[in-house]
Image (cartoon, helix red, strand yellow):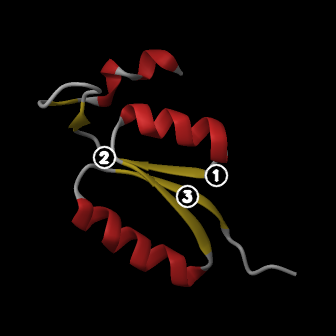
Amino acid sequence: MTNQQGKVLIVDDEVTNVVVLEALLTPLGYEVTTAKNGEDALRQVNQEKPDLVLLDVIIRCVGDSRKTRPRSWCKWF
């Protein structure tokens, strides 16, 4: 029997946020994967099939240095 709680995908381009969330969730038995942008997040969702996605509200566009709301890449869902 496994002590696995589920899969969580953390999507954030701020490393500190990712590290804190991983440190909180991993000891509780969650399998944590991470993505730094919308493109990575979509790839992870398709590959890993997470139970929960924790998504930064403002994140960098794919191929762009400015930050934007994720609605710009949600069209691919």
What residue does disc 1 label?
Answer: 51
What residue does disc 2 label?
Answer: 56
Quadrant in which residue 73 is drawn: top left
Asked if disc 1 and disc 3 are in contact, CB closer than 8 Å, the reply is yes
Q: Residue furthest front?
A: 63
Mark 2 surroundings within 10 Å by alpha-carbon count, few (fewer than 14), some (14 through 19), many (20 or more) = some
Find the distance from the CA under tag 1 to the CA under tag 3. Answer: 6 Å
Tell me what residue is drawn at x 32 percent, y 73 percent: 20
Could you tell me the amino acid type at mark 2? Asp
- 48 lies above or below 23: above
Q: Is residue 48 left or right of residue 62?
A: right
Residue 67 percent coordinates (x, y): 15, 33
What residue does disc 3 label?
Answer: 8
Tell me what residue is drawn at x 18 percent, y 25 percent: 64
Residue 53 percent coordinates (x, y): 50, 48
Mark 1 surroundings within 10 Å by alpha-carbon count, few (fewer than 14), some (14 through 19), many (20 or more) = few
- 1 lies above or below 51: below
Could you tell me the amino acid type at mark 3? Val
